[in-house]
Image (tube, helix red, strand yellow):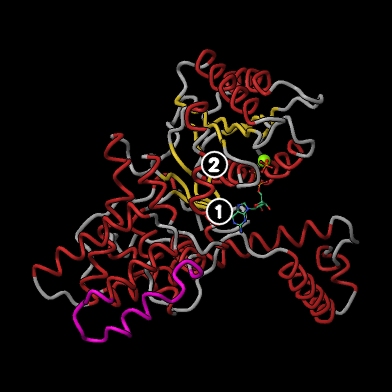
Amino acid sequence: MSEFDWFQRPTPEAEAAEDALAWAKEAYARLKAQQQGSQPEVETVEKVEAVKEVEIFEEPKPTEDPKLEEQKPVVSLLEQAAAKREERLASLAQEAPPAEPELGQLDADFLWSAEVLAAQGRSAAQVSIEEIDWLAKLRAGMEKTRQGFVTQLLENLGDDPLSEKSLEEIESLLLRADVGVESTDQSLDRLRKRMNEGVLDATEALGLLKQELREQLEKPLSNKGVFPLLAPDKNQLNIWLIVGVNGVGKTTTLGKLANLAVRSGYSCLVAAGDTFRAAAVQQLQVWAERSGVTVIANPSANADPAAVVFDAIGAARSKNIELLLVDTAGRLQTKHNLMEELAKVRRIIDRLAPEAKVESLLVLDASQGQNGLRQAMAFAAAAQLTGVVLTKLDGSARGGVALAVAAETGLPIRFIGAGEGIKDLRPFNSFEFVEALLARN
Ligand SMILES: Nc1nc2c(ncn2[C@@H]2O[C@H](COP(=O)(O)OP(=O)(O)OP(=O)(O)O)[C@@H](O)[C@H]2O)c(=O)[nH]1
Ligand SMILES: [Mg+2]
């Protein structure tokens, strides 16, 4: 099955599907047919190749030699070979999980993901297993942030209209999830206003709350007049600078971005701009290798990151690279040094590659909530931030910090990370994020 291109995600075609269940069933049937249609072919190729790889170090298989086949009883040899193959495939399956997500059951995960896609007006014919898989992961990752709230709220309310008491419950959920006071107040005002206009039941209230949160998340996009999806421009140099406090997930994010870019057909190069931490280059190399991407580094101690970026821009030009990802340090002897260094890197980029499309992405660890946000804002001036990447949503009870990010920084969230795996980072989509934040368990 061909790879799904996240940078070319289909845009909604029509109004949201009315019958989400029918939509989900149709999508499931299509994916199943797709998988059954293409998988045997893919599987055969993959398996044969995998077996060959193993066999390079072994004696040739008897069945591969026709003369031998003639001399020995055919059935038993074939049987032996088949048994051996089964054995190897079983062990291979254990060693390496399939790179591509597989279609699971038509279960609650699938239905929820399908519902979210259908509600965005997507056609059932365009859906990919990758999207279904990612949405399920996002919903699971946000579980700690939700803490069963929506289920509880709907149960508490039953058929009763929304009351002041339920507003208080909503307020406490939002604050606990680290949504921030500003965003919480704004959301409650909207609910209260509607409540005063007439009776509001729980489902309607939830719908309204979701709409409010979505609008808040999208505000930085409209304020800055930028597209919701950040993708590198084809056939030109794009430079994405990855900055943030130490340990928030910069290098991991960069590794995942390189993978996303390569899978979407971009040529990509990585600059090891964290020259402070000894193991940083090595860590970056491991990530880059997974996607077959070259790393430009300077192994000498205390090398100047600006010099590394200088070299990397030169290499990017000579190789017609479309996306240059620059890793940076999260810690130096002093914060002042760090900001100076970042500002210098930024100046070099602007001077050396004025034609490049530069993004300066601030990585934030969602589990640190608003504390992390305040700390990180020191980067705004030095690196001329253009967007945010929110990581570690999977281990966080403070996923709501996305709202505080939008309100306090005015920066659009561009990607979200929900896991340590190479595919656990995707472009941010406010609709999907809010659905995951306020999903019923
Ligand atoms: N659960 C989870 N862990 C993550 C995620 N992103 C990164 N991590 C983990 O966070 C830790 C720190 O990640 P790094 O990428 O090294 O962070 P960094 O910002 O580059 O750190 P410094 O270079 O030291 O400043 C690692 O153990 C990562 O595996 C995520 O989305 N979810
Ligand atoms: Mg790092």
- Which residue is at the front of the view, 113 or 415? 415
Q: Which residue is mark 2?
A: 375
Q: Amino acid at mark 1?
A: Gln
Other-residue count near label 2 (Cα within 10 Å), few / some / many at <14 / 14–19 / ≥20: few
Q: Is residue 162 magenta?
A: yes
x, y (%) of residue 299?
Answer: 80, 27
Whether residue 150 is in magenta: the answer is yes
Q: Which residue is mark 1?
A: 368
Quadrant position of residue 357 = top left
Across and down, in percent, residue 417 comes to 53, 53
Identify the residue at image location x=63%, y=33%.
328
Name the residue at 69% across, 27% down.
296
Quadrant holding ligand 2?
top right
Q: Nearer the viewer, residue 424 or 374?
A: 374
The vertical placement of 374 against 347, above or below, is below
Q: Residue 67 or 353: which is nearer the viewer?
A: 353
Contact between labelled residues 2 and 1, with CB atoms less than 8 Å apart: yes
How many discs appear?
A: 2
Query: Vertically, is 251 above or below 85?
Result: above
**Image-quadrant location for residue 346:** top right
Disc with the residue nearer the chain's start (1 vs 2): 1
Q: Residue at x 52, y 49 (%)?
A: 371
What secondary structure is the magenta-colored segment mainly?
Answer: helix
